[in-house]
Image (tube, rainbow, N blue to C red):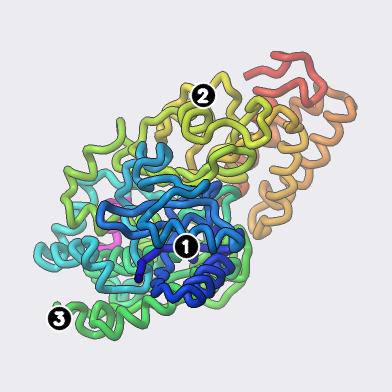
């Protein structure tokens, strides 16, 4: 008797015992003389079901979860029976509603293939994008990305193709590709999941970018808090070099390109592109004034493309399937799909990739299933620690860049953190100012000093000291931060502060509606 099963080695699965499950299953199989092959994959992103085991059968995979090491013997009975009954049997994974409702383009292979198998990557459509890129040439690559409507998935939403075109046309050599994998927003993990679950997708995307703009060197800047992602990417890069996908003659094309991993030390501000460039150059991560743009004078003063993981990982699909295919997903100026990350006090936390346009209410109530605590949802924060808090009254907001901007919010990196009715929004507003004060690089005064004064002002408001005067001062201070800061850290800190104050004034000791919109 032999069987093939798939079990994630993504950190989210390891944290809840995936390695112990693999060991227990292996030992049980040996005791019973069953030849059991366990392929370790990335995660499908259904975190409440992790570790989720999938058995290969002639009719397709059958999932079980969340499994524990103590389930090994009974699970093996179900495995030997070819997907037999078990209290944790979920059926075909694709039929689980959380997965069935998704449109997976960027995450199409994550959780399905062995992340470190180039043959499986190719069999699942990998490197078709690079093949087409090489056939059409640099100018057409850039035009395809422009026409796809892809916008930076790191938070700013700047058109990726325009950034590539600017770098391509910039004077100066050498040129660089920098991938920002310093994923620091609260409630986000999509970058990590791609690096751990489908690393060749990112390598392919960076390679296509390099050919498009004429770069021969790329840097992958990963936060030190992601040791598993770093290890997986290092192994994948070595395999890509051995296979000729990187190096002096990429895929026999004559193009030279290689990627070097740099590990950040954990400063949140190094997720800002110019501070990241300083860090790559061996300096303290400090924000640079713009202009000049990195596309003109970036790493070591040379033209540089800086994109985040999700932006670059979307590129192979765009090249393989065509710009129109990708552009057909989404609404308005927000095209393609967005990997949305549900976190916090939510029943069904995990990664949900879908076309832009789904409403916030659908994401939180229908897909996320409400709160894990069972209490009413009071607020959600969208876009990381600098994102606005949205009350239930705004749950009709479509998930797209312009709709969130119109309601004084941002979608950022696609993270949604859910809070139930026990949350203290004054505390959350104070936390935003405190976070900014701690993480500020210190270069500009509004961010460095304003955030510290902001903590003090909120404390006075909550204590009821000169309330009206301090409310006016807080609003004025937020305006200074928003328009006077050099980067998004100071510039976006007013979003959580003012949204908390505007939508939840009672937590600041006011009557509902007492704070002007």
**In this view, 287 is above or below 454:** below
- The x, y position of residue 440, in whole percent, is 67, 56
Figure quadrant of residue 72: bottom right
- The x, y position of residue 151, in whole percent, is 34, 46
* Residue shown at the point (39%, 44%) measured from the top left: 353
Image side of residue 60 versus residue 346, left or right:
left
* Residue shown at the point (69%, 14%) measured from the top left: 513
Q: Residues within 10 Å of mark 1 (few under 14, many from 20)?
A: many
* Callouts 1 and 3 close, C-beta under 8 Å: no
Residue holding disc 1: 76
Question: Does the rendering let one see residue 190?
Answer: yes
Residue holding disc 3: 252
* Element at label 2: loop
* For marks 1 and 3 on the same chain, the one whose residue lies earlier in the sequence: 1
* Residue shown at the point (37%, 64%) measured from the top left: 198
* Element at label 1: helix
* Element at label 3: helix
**In this view, 31 is above or below 369:** below
Residue holding disc 2: 395
* For marks 3 and 2 on the same chain, the one whose residue lies earlier in the sequence: 3
* Residue shown at the point (36%, 67%) measured from the top left: 3
User: Which residues are the magenta region?
Assistant: 160-170
Q: Does the magenta segment cover residue 255?
A: no
């Amino acid at each position: 008797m032999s069987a093939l099963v798939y079990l994630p080695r993504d950190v989210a699965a390891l944290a809840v015992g995936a390695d112990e499950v693999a060991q227990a299953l292996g030992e049980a199989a040996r005791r019973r003389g069953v030849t059991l092959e366990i392929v370790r994959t990335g995660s499908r992103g259904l975190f409440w079901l992790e570790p989720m085991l999938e058995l290969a059968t002639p009719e397709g995979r059958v999932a079980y979860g969340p499994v524990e090491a103590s389930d090994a013997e009974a699970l093996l009975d179900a495995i030997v029976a070819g997907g037999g009954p078990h209290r944790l049997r979920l059926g075909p994974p694709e039929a689980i509603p959380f997965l069935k409702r998704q449109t997976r383009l960027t995450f199409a292979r994550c959780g399905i293939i062995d992340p470190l198998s180039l043959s499986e990557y190719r069999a699942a459509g990998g490197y078709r994008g690079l093949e087409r890129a090489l056939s059409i040439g640099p100018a057409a690559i850039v035009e395809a990305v422009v026409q796809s409507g892809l916008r930076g998935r790191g938070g700013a939403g700047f058109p990726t193709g325009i950034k590539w075109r600017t770098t391509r046309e910039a004077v100066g050599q050498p040129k660089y590709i920098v991938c920002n994998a310093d994923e620091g927003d609260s409630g986000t993990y999509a970058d990590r999941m791609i690096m751990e679950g489908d690393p060749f997708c990112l390598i392919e995307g960076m390679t296509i970018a390099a050919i498009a703009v004429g770069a021969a060197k790329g840097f992958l800047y990963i936060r030190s808090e992601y040791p598993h992602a770093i290890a997986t990417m290092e192994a994948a890069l070595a395999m890509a070099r051995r296979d000729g996908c990187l190096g002096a003659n990429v895929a026999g094309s004559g193009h030279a390109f290689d990627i070097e991993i740099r590990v950040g030390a954990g400063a949140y501000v190094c997720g800002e592109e110019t501070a990241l460039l300083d860090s790559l150059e061996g300096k303290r991560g400090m924000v640079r004034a713009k202009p000049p743009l990195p596309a003109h004078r970036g790493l070591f003063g040379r033209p540089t493309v800086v994109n985040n993981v999700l932006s670059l990982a979307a590129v192979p699909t765009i090249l393989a399937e065509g710009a129109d295919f990708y552009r057909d997903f989404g609404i308005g100026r927000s095209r393609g799909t967005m990997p949305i990350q549900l976190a916090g006090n939510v029943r069904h936390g995990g990664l949900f990739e879908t076309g832009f346009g789904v409403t916030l209410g659908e994401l939180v109530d229908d897909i996320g299933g409400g709160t894990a605590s069972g209490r009413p949802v009071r607020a959600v924060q969208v876009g990381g620690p600098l994102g606005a808090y949205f009350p239930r009254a705004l749950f009709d907001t479509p998930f797209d860049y312009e709709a969130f901007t119109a309601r004084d919010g941002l979608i950022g990196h696609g993270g949604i953190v859910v809070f139930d009715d026990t949350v203290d929004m004054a505390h959350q507003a104070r936390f935003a100012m405190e976070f900014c004060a701690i993480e500020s690089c210190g270069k500009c005064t509004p961010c460095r000093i304003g955030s510290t004064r902001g903590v003090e002002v909120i404390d006075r408001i909550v204590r009821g000291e000169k309330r009206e005067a301090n409310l006016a001062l807080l609003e004025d201070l937020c305006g200074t931060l928003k328009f006077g800061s050099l980067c998004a850290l100071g510039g976006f800190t007013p979003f959580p502060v003012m949204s908390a104050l505007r939508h939840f004034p009672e937590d600041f000791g006011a009557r509902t509606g007492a704070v002007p919109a």
